[in-house]
Amino acid sequence: MIELAGVSHQFRIGKRGKERVVPVLHDINLKVEKGEIVAVVGRSGSGKSTLLNLMSGYIRPSSGEIRVGGQNVTKLDEGEWANFRLANYGFIFQSFQLIGSMTAYENVELPLVLKGIGSGERRAKVMKLLEQVGIAEFANHYPSELSGGQQQRVSVARSLILEPPIVLADEPSGSLDSENEKTLLTMIRQLNHELGITFVIITHDEQVASIAHRAIRLQDGRIGGLA
Ligand SMILES: Nc1ncnc2c1ncn2[C@@H]1O[C@H](COP(=O)(O)OP(=O)(O)O)[C@@H](O)[C@H]1O
Ligand SMILES: [Mg+2]
């Protein structure tokens, strides 16, 4: 489903002419199969977020090749990446990344609006999903009126609204208490089991890693042994 072959990445920082090169990932070879839940674990600074940002096209590898669903995405331009992300990926973030001026309903609806889906179909889809994640009764609340766990459910619903084959999550339970974390993990397992959604989840958390089929450990930008 996602394949990285010989992927390396270095950031260039500092002013032009006085640039410093910071190598972050080294010769990453990695295959995530369809329907897998893969946890990416490793210390802060080991390159986990960079790895996810490469998979999602927010940064380009310095070398190597990335394939998603059989397609070589290494050379897509910005516009092509935007479409590719919309069609293939849902995202869940530690900080939820909800839009504060929009209700829960509107946040989940937004990807459908961007895709040009009509309002009747949007309404049916959004309400069904809000029900599935257990927050339909909060549809008209703004993020500031919701608890962390409720906001995370909204963000999960938003990540799924376009029925993506792949969900990428960066520390999705990092802002949740253990009760809400449990709910989130149950939801992820269910989505994986029932819909076959592939998950790549960055985490520090043993609980999260424990629901994964496989854990990949990053150490100083290299894939270490099995975690
Ligand atoms: N945009 C950037 N520019 C320069 N250096 C960066 C950038 N993003 C990350 N880094 C560096 O890359 C390394 C890995 O960062 P990151 O992938 O965020 O690690 P993790 O998610 O495992 O904590 C760190 O040393 C970080 O400072
Ligand atoms: Mg990170």
Image (spheres, rainbow, N blue to C red):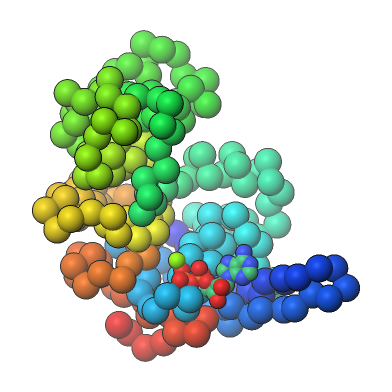
Which of the image's four quarters has the C terminus?
bottom left
**Left or right for 117, reference 189:** right
Position of the N terminus by quadrant: bottom left
Image coordinates of residue 2 in percent, x first then y, are 47, 62
Residue 62 placement: quadrant:
bottom right
Residue drawn at the location 22% of the way across and 40% of the way down: 147
The residue drawn where x is 46% and y is 30% is 111
Q: In the rendered image of this protein, does residue 186 appear above or below residue 121?
A: below
Ligand 1 shows up in the quarter that is bottom right
User: Going by the image, does 88 lie left or right of 108?
Assistant: right
Residue at the far bottom: name it.
225
Residue drawn where x is 35% and y is 74% of the image: 41
Q: Quadrant of residue 120?
A: top left
Q: Is residue 220 left or right of residue 8?
A: left
Q: Please, is residue 87 above or below residue 218 in the view? A: above
Name the foreground residue: 181 vs 28. Answer: 181
Find the residue positioned furthest to the top: 120
Image quadrant where residue 226 sits:
bottom left
Residue 82, percent across and down?
A: 60, 42
- Vertical arrangement, residue 219 with respect to residue 104, above or below: below
- Asked whether the viewer can see residue 160, the reply is no
Residue placed furthest toward the left:
179
Q: How many marks?
A: 0
> Which sits in the foreground, 180 or 111?
180
Can see residue 97?
yes
> Which residue corresponds to the image point at 37% horizontal and 88% vertical from the top-left?
225
Question: Residue pushed farthest right?
Answer: 17
Q: How far across and how far down the image is residue 204, in percent?
A: 31, 71
